[in-house]
Amino acid sequence: MSQNQSSLAQSQASGVVPTHIREFLAFKLGREEYGIDILRVQEIRSYEEPTRMANAPSYIKGVVNLRGVIVPIIDMRIKFNLEDVKYDGFTVVIVLNIGNQVIGMVVDGVSDVITLAPEQLRPVPELNSAIAGDHLLAIGSLEDRMLILLDIEKLMSSADMGLVAQTLQ
């Protein structure tokens, strides 16, 4: 574990909100708005039906060929147990660079890039949700909006996702 990851884990354990990431890509899943580190985003693409993989979990929609790179496509709406998953003109794929892997993440739509000051970040309350607590960074608060800030690296490299090799550790 790097020194930066270690200090992040310590700050989360003590209830202090990590503040080293300041720019987030905001996106929608159902009625909720989430944010991920903008530096992990490679591009945003319109949704295209991926090639299905046999025996893959339901949230892994399949793979697409992105300029010669085979990219797994994860539907975060299915992963987070959202109801009413539909594919329309607003559905997009956020292409992420996690470790040495490129991963596509299907979401309901992308809002904007948001810069958050440390005073706009709140600790995540202990909840029983579809997202493990250590995959959440903080709650970002902006005027009338609240963003659930995800640690996209930890989420995509978690054992239950089975996507990113353990090279991040």
Image (spheres, rainbow, N blue to C red):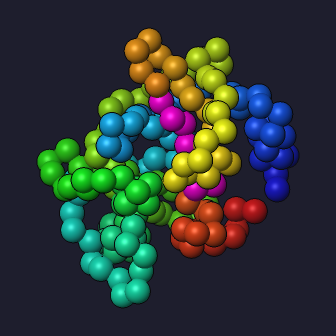
Residue 135 shows in this picture: no
- Does the magenta segment cover residue 33? no
Q: Is residue 30 left or right of residue 128?
A: left
Between 44 and 120, the residue placed more toward the observer is 120
Residue depicted at x 30% and y 80%: 52
Quarter in which the C terminus is drawn = bottom right
Q: Residue at x 51, y 35 (%)?
A: 148
In the rendered structure, the answer to whether residue 168 lies left or right of residue 63 reads right
Name, please, the residue furthest toward the front.
Answer: 128
The question of residue 153 being in magenta is answered with yes
In depth, the one of 49 and 70 nearer the eye is 49
Q: Nearer the viewer, residue 32 or 5?
A: 32
Q: Identify the residue at image location x=53%, y=29%.
A: 23
Which stretch appears magenta?
147-155
Picture coordinates of residue 20, whole percent (x, y):
69, 31
Q: Residue at the spot x=40%, y=15% of the render?
A: 144
Q: Quadrant of residue 29?
A: top left
Residue 143: x and y in percent read 44, 12
Mark yes or no: residue 94 visible.
Answer: yes
Image vertical order of residue 11 relative to residue 102, above or below? above
Instruction: Name the image quarter holding residue 103.
Output: bottom left
89 displayed left or right of 39? left
The quadrant the N terminus occupies is: bottom right
Residue 57 found in image quarter: bottom left
Q: Is residue 10 above or below residue 141?
A: below
Report the front residue among 81 and 21: 81
Across the whole image, how many numbered discs are drawn on residues? 0
Question: Residue 135: horizontal and vertical position, in percent?
Answer: 62, 49
Q: Position of residue 145 (x, y in %)?
A: 42, 21
Name of the residue lying farthest toward the left: 89
As drawn, the residue found furthest toward the bottom would be 54
